[in-house]
Image (cartoon, rainbow, N blue to C red):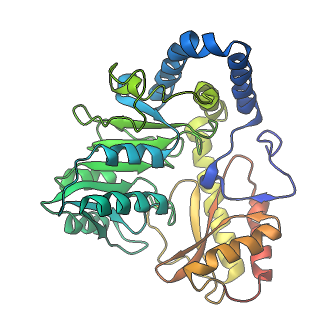
């Protein structure tokens, strides 16, 4: 499988959730699209490309179980969320709600739009390992009459937790944006009946598409304009996102091949197998480090888990990059996390991982000396 994904066999790859990796056969499909575009760039972009993009969007929408006219292409979740934020007419005193478990780049976007408009970001606070009811209560407590948008992660990035987005959407009165960066290929969600106003997910993580493939779904009447206003702006919501200008569209065009790979690999049965693999790996690493699994997420992501580090190993957020560099220098790619005063590593299980990978991670972690 390492060869199937074109990965360096000398490196231990345990962080698929960060950037994903498309299988070699999918990358070759993307290369073929690039070659085709270069043979006659004028005709390809002017005539051939628009229906091809729409066809790829329809294929991806079917995978997500939504209508093709309800989703717009984006390069990633951050871009899609920025489109939603740019479409809000924020006023002084308005509020945006998010949690500390959210993705850091999304928080920066929220802070930016709040600062320039006189709005503010209100944090929904809940502990790692909180039950669903507690999570919902935290969002309800944070949302108020001036709340314009509530951002809820379907799977949190730093803490690898599945959040009860439908329960939040049913309880708060403000529009809910679901950050589903890790959703497609990990969770089989009913997006249209989730209660969300906006939903955006990446296909390039767990659905094996090339990087740069994300879809932004919007409820009828809530469609945001694309960040880039281009030729198809007046042709409906979905088409307005299809062509942001001259760039490389090969990833979008090859996304269907990534979805086919996901299906051929076993689909949801394979996801269940990977969930078992990463759960066993979590136990192996924690046992080797002598750390407890108590207090970790009660609803962990199917293919990602946290392992608590021994207290001296990671003592501050400033040490995350240092610990990463120490591990990477030893040929280990994994995600150190510092959350609420505690250090962790976030591990993943992708099709190319084996049980022995987690033993190797544990062995390397036990050799890391000194606090960071």
Residue 44 placement (x, y as % from top left): 62, 13
As drawn, 5 above or below 134: above
Residue 298 placement (x, y as % from top left): 44, 66
Left or right: 55 as drawn, with respect to 153: right
Left or right: 146 as drawn, with respect to 210: left
Position of the N terminus, as image quadrant, is top right
Asked whether residue 18 is in view, the answer is yes
Residue 172 placement (x, y as % from top left): 19, 56
Q: Quadrant of the rendered structure where residue 266 is?
A: top right
Q: Residue furthest left?
A: 145
As drawn, 355 above or below 178: below
Q: Residue at x 72, y 19 (%)?
A: 38
Q: Quadrant of the rendered structure where residue 268 is?
A: top right
Residue 49 placement (x, y as % from top left): 56, 16
Residue sitting nearer the eye, 149 or 49: 49
Q: Residue furthest right?
A: 10
Q: Residue at x 35, y 38 (%)?
A: 191
Q: How many marks?
A: 0
Q: Residue at x 52, y 21 (%)?
A: 53
Q: Quadrant of the rendered structure where residue 307 is?
A: bottom right
Asked whether residue 187 is in view, the answer is no
Q: Residue at x 65, y 90 (%)?
A: 312
As drawn, 187 above or below 290: above
As drawn, 330 above or below 53: below
Position of the C terminus, as image quadrant, is bottom right
């Amino acid at each position: 499988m390492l060869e199937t994904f074109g990965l360096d066999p000398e490196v231990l790859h345990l962080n698929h959730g960060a950037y994903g990796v498309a299988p070699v056969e999918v990358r070759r499909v993307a290369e073929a699209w690039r070659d085709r575009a270069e043979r006659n760039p004028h005709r390809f972009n002017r005539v051939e490309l628009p229906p091809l993009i729409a066809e790829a969007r329809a294929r991806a929408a079917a995978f997500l179980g939504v209508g093709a006219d309800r989703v717009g292409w984006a390069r990633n979740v951050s871009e899609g969320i920025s489109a939603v934020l740019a479409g809000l007419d924020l006023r002084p005193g308005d509020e945006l709600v998010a949690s500390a478990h959210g993705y850091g780049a999304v928080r920066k976007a929220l802070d930016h739009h709040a600062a320039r408009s006189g709005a503010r970001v209100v944090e929904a606070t809940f502990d790692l390992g909180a039950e669903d009811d507690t999570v919902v209560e935290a969002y309800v407590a944070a949302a108020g009459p001036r709340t314009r948008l509530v951002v809820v992660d379907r799977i949190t990035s730093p803490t690898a937790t599945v959040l009860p987005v439908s329960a939040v959407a049913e309880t708060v009165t403000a529009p809910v944006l679901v950050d589903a960066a890790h959703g497609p290929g990990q969770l089989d969600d009913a997006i249209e009946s989730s209660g969300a106003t906006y939903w955006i997910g990446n296909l390039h993580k767990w659905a094996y598409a090339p990087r740069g493939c994300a879809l932004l779904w919007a409820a009828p009447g809530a469609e945001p304009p694309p960040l880039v206003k281009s030729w198809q702006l007046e042709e409906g919501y979905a088409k307005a996102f299809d062509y942001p200008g001259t760039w490389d569209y090969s990833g979008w065009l090859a996304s269907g091949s990534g979805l086919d790979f996901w299906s051929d690999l076993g689909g949801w049965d394979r996801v269940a197998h990977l969930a078992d693999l990463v759960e066993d790996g979590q136990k192996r690493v924690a046992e080797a480090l002598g750390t407890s699994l108590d207090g970790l997420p009660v609803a962990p992501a199917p293919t990602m888990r946290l392992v608590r580090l021994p207290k001296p190993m990671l003592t501050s957020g400033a040490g995350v990059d240092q610990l990463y560099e120490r591990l990477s220098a030893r040929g280990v790619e994994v995600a150190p996390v510092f959350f609420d005063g505690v250090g962790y590593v976030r591990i993943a299980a992708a099709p190319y991982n084996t049980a022995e990978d987690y033993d190797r991670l544990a062995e390397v972690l036990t050799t890391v000396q000194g606090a960071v």
